[in-house]
Each structure stands twice: as structure tokens, then as C-alpha cells.
Amino acid sequence: MPFKIRPATEQDLPSILAIYNPEVLHGFATWNDQPFSLESFQNKLQEFQKNDWPFWVIEDQDSFKIAGYADYAPFRHFSGYCYTAEHSLYIAPEYARLGLGKRLLQHLIKHAGQHGKHVLVAGIDHGNAASIALHQQFGFTQTGYMPQVGQKLGQWRDLVLMQLILD
């Protein structure tokens, strides 16, 4: 299956919602507990485009289905953090374990380095061993562990903070 990474468009948003909202309702990849509306993702895409922050999809070129998406934005909104970004990366379950997460993460890292970022940060649920391992493959190191800082599906969740220094 050939796949293409390209900027997300408004036409991709229903597919992005179909990837993200099941995680909201049943998973731990995000600690949001209410499904997002199409309008909320339209607003997100517009904000990313307005601020020139990357928001990409990876598309199956055989079926033209969106297999996953990734983005990064400022880590925190204080000027001293302007060279640090936090990223998100989601793959549709039917496309898991095909190396698409690797491709998207590699794309994020390359883009961040070319656009003056110094550090990429990942905030990962402690139970997401696959994501932790993926980040370790790219040189991310665990720089923090925050026990019970979030709650999801009636459980207290621990946050693993990982970072990659780009230069």
C-alpha cells in the first residue's frame, strides 16, 4: 500500500474525527472525555493554518482513506518556550503496525528541525507502551513522569513526558 503525507484539508476532518473520537470515548491516547464536533476540528485546522503550524494526514493512495494524522503546536504560550513544540500523532486502528506512525513522526521531526524548533515534547499515557517505544526509536528520552495527573474512564492516569532535542 502506498501512502502519502500531505497537509490536512477541511475535507479530511470527518476522517480525522473518526480516528480521534473513538480514542476519546474508549482509549487513553487522549484524556479528553467528550467527543469533538466537526466544528471544533474546523476551528483547530483554521488556527493551525493561521499560525503556520503543521497539521498533516497520511493517506492510503489505494483507497484515499486517511490512515492517520499528526501535528505540532507551541508547548506553552510563553515567549521563552517559542522553540519548543508539543506534538500529537494518531493512527487509525486498521492501519496500526504498518510503520505509518514512524513515517509521521519522522516527518514531524524533520519539519520541526527545518523550522527552527529546538525541542519536541510528547505527553504520553503511561500505559501506551507502543507510543513510548516509537518515540524511543527516534531518540526521545523520558524527562518526566507525573503520577495520577489525569483521569479517564474512571481511572487515574500517569503522564510520561518525553523530549527530543533537535540540534
Image: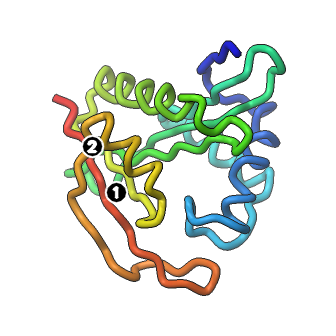
Could you tell me residue 41's position as x and y percent?
Answer: 70, 49
Labels in figure, total: 2
Quadrant position of the N terminus in the picture: top right
Residue at the spot 46% in from the left edge and 65% down from the top edge? 127
Of labels 2 and 1, earlier in sequence is 1
| Left or right of 106 in this view: 82 | left
Q: Is residue 102 above or below residue 14?
A: above
Say the numbered circle drawn on residue 76: 1
Quadrant position of the C terminus in the picture: top left
Residue at the spot 80% in from the left edge and 51% down from the top edge? 38
Q: Amino acid at mark 1?
A: Arg
Say the numbered circle drawn on residue 140: 2
| Left or right of 163 in this view: 27 | right
Q: Nearer the viewer, residue 105 or 119?
A: 105
Could you tell me residue 9's position as x and y percent?
Answer: 71, 29
- Residue 29: tell me if it is visible: yes
What's the distance in space between the residues labelled 2 and 1, CA to CA?
19 Å
Q: Nearer the viewer, residue 61 or 1?
A: 1
| Left or right of 14 in this view: 128 | left
Q: Amino acid at mark 2?
A: Phe
Name the residue at the left extreme.
167
Q: Is residue 39 above or below residue 159?
A: above
Could you tell me residue 23's position as x and y percent?
Answer: 67, 59
Residue at the spot 40% in from the left edge and 41% down from the top edge? 134
What SS does tag 1 mark? loop
